[in-house]
Image: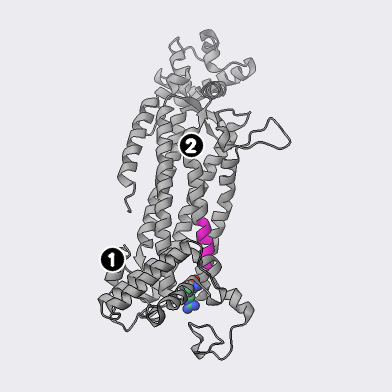
Amino acid sequence: MSQATNQSWGGRFSEPTDAFVERFTASVNFDQRLAPQDIQGSIAHATMLARVGVLTDDERDAIINGLSEIKGEIERGEFEWSVPLEDVHMNIEARLTDKIGITGKKLHTGRSRNDQVATDIRLFMRDAIDVIEAELVRLREGMIGLADREAETIMPGFTHLQTAQPVTFGHHLLAWQEMMARDHERLLDCRRRVNVMPLGAAALAGTTYPIDRHVTAELLGFERPAENSLDAVSDRDFAIEFTSFASILLMHLSRMSEELVLWTSAQFDFIDLPDRFCTGSSIMPQKKNPDVPELVRGKTGRIYGHLMSLLTLMKSQPLAYNKDNQEDKEPLFDAVDTVRDCLKAFADMVPAIEPKKASMFEAARKGFSTATDLADYLVRKGVAFRDAHEIVGQSVAYGLKAEKDLSEMTLDELKQFSATIEQDVFEVLTLEGSVAARNHIGGTAPDQVRAAAQRARDALAAIKGEAQ
Ligand code: ARG
């Protein structure tokens, strides 16, 4: 082997790599994050090779001991990463050969960096998904708990951001929870397709050694070996699926963030966020800014960006492996870190939301939010819905002029618009009456909210950690 060229593939080269090209093509500065998975995969590979007789048991043991020591060196920060060695795989293999000599060079038998890196990323993603799932479960539990506690708290419900009808705060929180429940399903669905093993595909066509891919898959906890070697080393659709999940999740978190930001403003004044989730202003002493939700809203953009990066990275790649795929790691790593941190922020923050009940109630009382209830009342008394709509419209117009909500008018004032209106109208014009009347599955009545919270708890218990 030529001394002047890269040691792992230098045989056919007659001059060393250009210094810039070496730096340009190297990935070790970011893919060293895959070291734990790389070692885990190599140990399983060596174990399988010994099982089928390609390595002796002594060779296997030397490799496994060497790799375990290297793992310790990396964890203690003692490992010296080398850019000329290009990536995490060749760094670890070179160190193994340093330590145990010629046996270290046998580890790569029946394997290529192409199936090795695809396996490492899948192992990494599986671990990441499990950490993310735990935060998502914590967030869902927090939402359900708060919804149950606030089942009777009344706030205005909005369409077009205009006061529409009164709802309960618990009902609003359970709407958020439904979004998270669907994201949870998408995450677990993604995990099923991540958990398939490329190892054994070798460079692209498989290998001539008598490998047993079922053994390696079982050792690594994969559901099964990938069906086709060309596909196994080339496609990164599982990474695209993860960033799709992440994009939808962040879109949801961004919507919730927007509401939290609005609600903490003096104009809405619906909730307080504890000081630990907010920061002040260096110039305006009165300010308390909802930085955490604002940042989550802002981070949505970078997640969408990672999805676009990966989709574009993959398009037009001919089978099988291409170096383009080295570009999958940075977006994916950042997506994993961002999703985990945003979920952690929300899981910590949501149970700490302090609703300002009087202020929410007052806002619901002000916006003629029981107008639909008055129309429904008239319909129950035999008025056609379109006529009832017209009568209530006139009452609201009068209320705007007189600066009175419907429930603040006297019976005589209301009777100007319809003689059908009697004393019992005031039962439906109260906010409590209005929400309690929407008493069917999916409705905002406090009893329904409590029942829905219980169903959500049961559904979460059934799905939680299903993958592990
Ligand atoms: N660093 C490469 C990657 O991330 C590893 C595979 C390289 N394989 C190759 N034949 N150049 O994709």
Which image quadrant is residue 216 in?
bottom left
- Label 2 CB sits under 8 Å from any ligand 1 atom: no
Q: What mark, if any, has residue 350 been given in the picture?
A: 2
**Residue 104 can be seen, yes or no:** yes
Q: Which residues are magenta?
A: 327-335
Label 1 crowd bin: few (<14), some (14–19), many (20+), radius 10 Å: some
Label 2 crowd bin: few (<14), some (14–19), many (20+), radius 10 Å: some
- Could you give the CA–CA distance between mark 1 and mark 2, rounded to whole angstroms? 39 Å
Determine the secondary structure under disc 1: helix
Look at 58% across and 52% down and name the residue there.
301
Which x, y percent locates residue 191?
38, 57
Identify which residue, 419 or 250, lies in the foreground.
Answer: 250
Q: Nearer the viewer, mark 1 or mark 2?
A: 1
Look at 51% across and 11% down and name the residue there.
415
Whether 453 is drawn above or below 115: the answer is above
Q: Amino acid at mark 2?
A: Val
Whether 249 is drawn above or below 159: the answer is below
Which x, y percent locates residue 227?
32, 71
Reading the image, the residue beneath label 1 is 218
Q: Amino acid at mark 1?
A: Glu
Look at 44% across and 73% down and name the residue there.
234
Q: Is 130 positioned to the left or the right of 9 in the image?
A: left
Please, what is the dominant secondary structure of the magenta stretch? helix
Q: Please, which residue is most extreme toward the right here?
A: 283
Which x, y percent locates residue 60?
32, 75
Identify which residue, 193 or 64, lies in the foreground.
Answer: 64
Residue 333 drawn in magenta = yes
